[in-house]
């Protein structure tokens, strides 16, 4: 009978080839990579903007968020809608209001967002004020 021994290092350290795997000793210190603290924190999907679709519950609003995502097969951008339950502590939002959702600790089983009013954007154009026309009307002397 022939006795065959495998000498591969892939048998969890068993066999003759286990000496090929090098295990660091405890004397060797390993340094773990830490990201630098100067980088800004990534706030992806921590704030979203949507429209209130239901406000009948006490201190809770249902907000529909619409985003554009590529279709998996046709690669055309399609609208994806999702409803989130958000905390409204003062019951200040009504149906149709545009709100901003901010991620918070879980408030209940389905609520992990806080509804905030959308901040007003500064307009780039100043409002046009009616100026006096230099041409007098016929009714003016």
Image (spheres, helix red, strand yellow):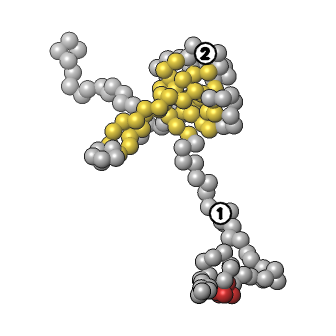
Q: How far is mark 1 from mark 2, CA to CA?
A: 42 Å
Picture layout, residue 124 above or below residue 98: below
* Residue pictured at 50% horizontal, 28% vertical: 83
Picture layout, residue 5 above or below residue 132: below
- The reply, left or right, for residue 38 in relation to residue 63 is right
Q: Check residue 24 in the rendering and tell me which mark sits there, or answer none.
A: none
In the picture of the structure, the residue carrying the numbered disc 1 is 38
Viewport quadrant of the N terminus: bottom right
Viewport quadrant of the C terminus: top left
Which is nearer the N-term, disc 1 or disc 2?
A: 1
Residue 82 in view in this figure = yes
* Residue 39 at x, y percent in the picture: 62, 61
**Could you say whether the residue bearing mark 2 is in a helix, strand or loop?**
loop
* Quarter residue 55 falls in: top right
In the picture of the structure, the residue carrying the numbered disc 2 is 57
* Residue 14 at x, y percent in the picture: 68, 79
* Residue 116 at x, y percent in the picture: 59, 30
* Quarter residue 30 falls in: bottom right
* Residue pictured at 38% horizontal, 40% vertical: 68
* Residue pictured at 62% horizontal, 54% vertical: 41
Neighbourhood count class around disc 2 (C-alpha, 10 Å): few under 14, some 14–19, many 20 upward: few
Question: Contact (CB < 8 A) between labels 1 and 2?
Answer: no
């Amino acid at each position: 009978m022939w006795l065959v021994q495998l000498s591969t290092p892939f048998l969890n350290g068993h066999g003759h080839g286990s000496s090929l795997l090098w295990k660091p000793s405890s004397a060797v210190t390993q340094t773990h990579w830490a990201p630098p603290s100067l980088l800004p924190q990534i706030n992806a999907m921590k704030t979203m903007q949507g429209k209130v679709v239901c406000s009948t519950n006490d201190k809770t609003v249902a907000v529909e968020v619409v985003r554009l995502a590529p279709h998996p097969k046709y690669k055309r951008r399609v609208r994806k809608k999702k409803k989130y339950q958000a905390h409204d502590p003062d019951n200040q939002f009504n149906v149709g209001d545009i709100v901003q959702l901010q991620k918070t600790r879980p408030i209940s089983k389905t609520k992990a967002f806080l509804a905030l009013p959308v901040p007003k954007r500064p307009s780039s154009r100043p409002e046009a004020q009616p100026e006096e026309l230099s041409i007098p009307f016929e009714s003016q002397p």
